[in-house]
Image (tube, rainbow, N blue to C red):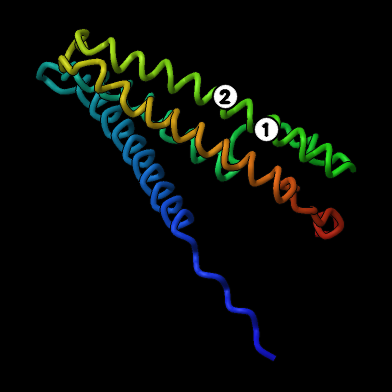
């Protein structure tokens, strides 16, 4: 018998995968920047020359960028904080409704954050960061992108769950764990 060929990914799936990799890369770079600058700050305490004031500023900005760049990823991979007690309800329709409602709330929150981030990008250009003198509107651009990504990803996930059904947890094999 012939096996069904796996369908090739659609254009949207390929775009989503590229965006996923870009956001993951941005998050990883932010973590590395934070780590390197924290080590530099610690080393500066023991060195005989003046410390670099910009290290703390960049570390704080990188933490904000990391947080907002990872929001969309966490929604897509179900890595966000969630109460999975609801997922164990017997009624699949109830689980579907609750999961869709939760994702709609996340999407609405993402839209609200995006609107406020856009307002900050538009109005904060005159304000500069204390040490590096970066326009604060530049600092808020990654926040805007992360909020938009979260809103889009949560909306897509809500539609997928509404159409295809809820994402249910994998059944755990408690007996094999108990005997091991």
Report how many numbered discs are placed on residues in the image.
2
Q: Is residue 43 above or below residue 133?
A: below
Q: The N terminus lies in which quarter of the figure?
A: bottom right
Q: Which residue is mark 2?
A: 108
**Quarter-wise, where is residue 89 in the image?**
top right
- Would you call the spot at circle 2 few (<14 residues within 10 Å), some (14-19), or many (20 or more)? some
Q: Residue at x 28, y 10 (%)?
A: 123
Q: Residue at x 50, y 69 (%)?
A: 8
Q: The C terminus lies in which quarter of the figure?
A: bottom right
Tag 1 near tag 2, CB within 8 Å: no
Q: Residue at x 48, y 56 (%)?
A: 13
**Quarter-wise, where is residue 148 in the image?**
top left
List the single residue furthest toward the left. 49
Q: Residue at x 32, y 30 (%)?
A: 34
- The answer to whether residue 89 is left or right of residue 162 is right
Q: Is residue 75 above or below residue 160?
A: above
Residue nearer the viewer, 110 or 82:
110
Tell me which label, 1 or 2, sits earlier in the chain: 1
How far across and down, in percent of the image, does residue 73 sit? 49, 41
How far across and down, in percent of the image, does residue 39 sit? 28, 30
* CA distance for labels 1 and 2: 17 Å
Secondary structure state at the residue bearing disc 1:
loop
Q: Is residue 143 above or below residue 157?
A: above
- The answer to whether residue 68 is left or right of residue 2 is left
List the single residue furthest toward the bottom. 1
Q: Which mark is residue 82?
A: 1
Q: Which mark is residue 91?
A: none
**Quarter-wise, where is residue 116 in the image?**
top left
How far across and down, in percent of the image, does residue 171 sit? 80, 53
- Would you call the spot at circle 1 few (<14 residues within 10 Å), some (14-19), or many (20 or more)? few
Secondary structure state at the residue bearing disc 2:
helix
């Amino acid at each position: 018998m012939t096996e069904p060929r796996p369908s090739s990914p659609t254009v949207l799936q390929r775009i989503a995968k590229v965006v996923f990799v870009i956001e993951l890369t941005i998050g990883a770079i932010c973590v590395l920047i934070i780590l390197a600058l924290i080590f530099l700050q610690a080393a500066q305490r023991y060195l005989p020359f003046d410390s670099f004031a910009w290290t703390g500023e960049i570390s704080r900005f990188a933490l904000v960028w990391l947080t907002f760049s990872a929001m969309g990823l966490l929604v897509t991979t179900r890595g966000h904080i969630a109460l999975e007690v609801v997922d164990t309800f017997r009624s699949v329709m109830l689980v579907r409704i609750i999961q869709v409602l939760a994702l709609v709330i996340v999407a609405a929150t993402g839209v609200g954050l995006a609107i406020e981030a856009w307002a900050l990008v538009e109005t904060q250009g005159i304000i500069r960061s204390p040490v590096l003198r970066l326009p604060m509107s530049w600092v808020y651009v990654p926040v805007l992108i992360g909020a938009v990504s979260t809103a889009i990803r949560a909306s897509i996930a809500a539609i997928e769950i509404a159409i295809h059904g809820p994402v249910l947890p994998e059944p755990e094999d408690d007996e094999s764990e108990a005997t091991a």
